[in-house]
Amino acid sequence: MSSSPAPADRRPPAWPWYVGAAAAVTATAVAGGRFVDPAGTWYRALRKPSWQPPSWAFGAVWTPLYGSLAWAGGRALATTRGGERTRLLGSLGLNLVLNAGWNALFFGRRSPRAGLAGTVLLDLSNAELLLRVSRADRPAGRALLPYATWCLFATALNGALVRLNPGSGRPSPRAGR
């Protein structure tokens, strides 16, 4: 007599959701990274607040944050079904677009003002994603807290750059490249 569960009781494997979330987060990091140029003349010329971390710290921080975002997304997607999963996929997808979009707005357009608008939208998306993921899986929701917190810090930093550089809110002639 077999003690294995009946086929109707078996859950599909979770690993495809983790792989999919990791691929989406990786694509976000690559797409957003195409715009980043912290050593460029434009960025170096901006006045920065005294509390801005050094440039190398951003990569050191974003790498584990992206890892936790992929893990949390994969775990929450693996535990949801139907419409709940569809809404979670939409929330995660929008969040990733906004995440990469900030780089295009700030560095690509060379506009701290546009970047600030983008990061505020990202913060709103983070709050919604955090709630949705937490409802699906509490540990996954907790894993998103450092990501959401860092994005709030980035918003404060972006706001300081707007205040310190009031004339830099317009795209440069090279922004269309």
Image (cartoon, rainbow, N blue to C red):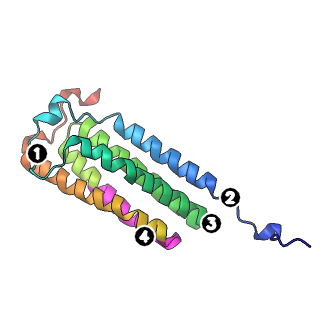
Mark 3 or 2 closer to N-term? 2
Mark 1 or 2 closer to N-term? 2
- Residue 88 or residue 66, whichever sits in front: 66
* Residue under label 4: 131
Residue in view at x 19 percent, y 27 percent: 173
Residue in view at x 48 percent, y 72 percent: 138
Label 4: element kind: helix
Give the class, few, some or many, for how many residues have Cα within 10 Å of label 2's Cα (few <14, many ≥20). few
Residue 66 appears in the picture as rendered: yes
Q: Position of residue 142 (x, y in %)?
A: 41, 68
Mark 4 or 3 closer to N-term? 3
* Residue under label 1: 48
Name the mark nearer the viewer: 3 or 1.
Answer: 1
Q: Position of residue 157 (x, y in %)?
A: 18, 52
The answer to the question of whether label 1 and label 4 lie on touching residues, with beta carbons closer than 8 A, is no
| Distance (Cα) linking label 3 and label 2 | 13 Å
The answer to the question of whether label 4 and label 3 lie on touching residues, with beta carbons closer than 8 A, is no
Please give the label number shown on residue 159.
Answer: none
| Distance (Cα) linking label 2 and label 4 | 24 Å
Range of magenta residues: 120-138
User: As shown in the figure, which amino acid type bears the numbered disc 4?
Assistant: Leu
| Distance (Cα) linking label 1 and label 4 | 33 Å
* Residue under label 3: 81
Q: Is residue 85 left or right of residue 124?
A: right
Give the class, few, some or many, for how many residues have Cα within 10 Å of label 4's Cα (few <14, many ≥20). some
Q: Position of residue 65 (x, y in %)?
A: 38, 53
Name the mark nearer the viewer: 3 or 2.
Answer: 2
Residue in view at x 53 percent, y 64 percent: 76
* Residue under label 2: 13
